[in-house]
Image (spheres, grey):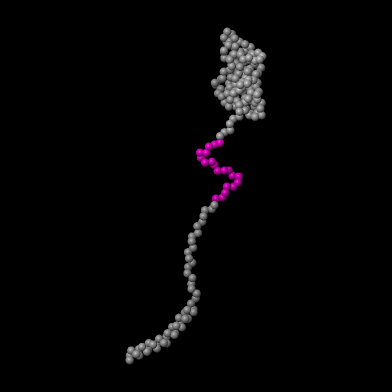
Amino acid sequence: LLLTSSSSLDADRAHRYLPLLFRRRRQMCKGAGPPVPGPPPPQPPVTSSPPAQASQPAGTAPAAAPAGAQAPAPAPPPAPCLTRYLGAKTGLSQGGLGSTYVVIVFKNLNNYPCSLYGYPGVALDAGKPATEVGLAAAENPATPRELVILGPHKDANALLRIVEAASYPPTKCKPVATQWLQIIPPNQTVPIYLGYTSTACAKPVRILTVDAVRPGSGG
C-alpha cells in the first residue's frame, strides 16, 4: 500500500508540473533574440609590391657604356698633299757663320685639307731646262718627322741650310752658279722650281741640310 501511494503521488505531481515546464520552455524560445554572429573570419595579409620604375624621359643622356667597351677609332688623317695642289715660296732668309738659312713655305691651294709628313727633297739647279747640281739636301735628324694637317689655303714650312761653297777648296768643291731651288714635297715625286740664286758644289760635297716640315709659315 505504501508503494502504491507513493507512485500515485509522483504521477500526480508530474501531471501538474510537466505542462508548466513546457510552457516555460516555449516562452524562453519565443523571447530569445537572433543568434549572435561570431567573429569575422581572418583576412589574408595585404602585401605591397615595389613601385614600377619610371621609364627614362626623352632627351636624357643614355646610360654609360659598360666597363671594357672599346672607344671608337679616330678618323684617319687627310691624304698627302699633291704637288699640283701646293704652292711654294721662299720665306725668311738669314746668313751667318758660313751658312745661309732659308725658310721654304708650302701653301695648300686646294679647298680640302691635306697632310705633309717628313722632309721635302731640295736641290740646287742651274740652266734651262733646270739641271740638278751636286748633292741633294740631307735630312736634319734634330727635327723628327711629325704629321702636319694643312687646311685649305694654310701654310707649312721647312728650314733649309745652305753652306757657302767658298768654305771648301775649289778643287774639292768645284763651285757652280745656280738659279733654281728644286723642291719636292714630302711623299711626292713631282718637283716645284723656285727662282733662287746661289752657288753649289758640283763635286760630291754636302752643303744642303733641310728640316722636317712644321706647321705655319716659319715666321
- Residue 56 is inside the magenta segment: yes
- Residue 199 is inside the magenta segment: no
Q: Is residue 86 above or below residue 99?
A: below
Q: Is residue 78 above or below residue 131?
A: below
Residue 188 percent across, percent down from the top left: 61, 23
Identify the image quadrant of residue 202.
top right
Q: Nearer the viewer, residue 219 or 216?
A: 216
Q: Is residue 216 visible?
A: no
Q: Is residue 200 above or below residue 41?
A: above
| Magenta stretch in the rendered image | 53-72
- Where the C terminus falls, by quadrant? top right
Report the magenta stretch's main SS: loop
- Report the residue at 52% width, 39% height from top: 69
- Report the residue at 64% width, 23% height from top: 83
- Report the residue at 42% width, 85% height from top: 17
- Where the N terminus falls, by quadrant? bottom left
Identify the image quadrant of residue 97.
top right
Q: Is residue 37 visible?
A: yes
| Left or right of residue 53: residue 107 | right
- Report the residue at 57% width, 26% height from top: 146
Residue 121 percent across, percent down from the top left: 60, 20
Residue 148 percent across, percent down from the top left: 60, 27
Q: Nearer the viewer, residue 7 or 94?
A: 7
| Left or right of residue 49: residue 115 | right
Identify the image quadrant of residue 200.
top right
Which residue is outermost to the top? 171
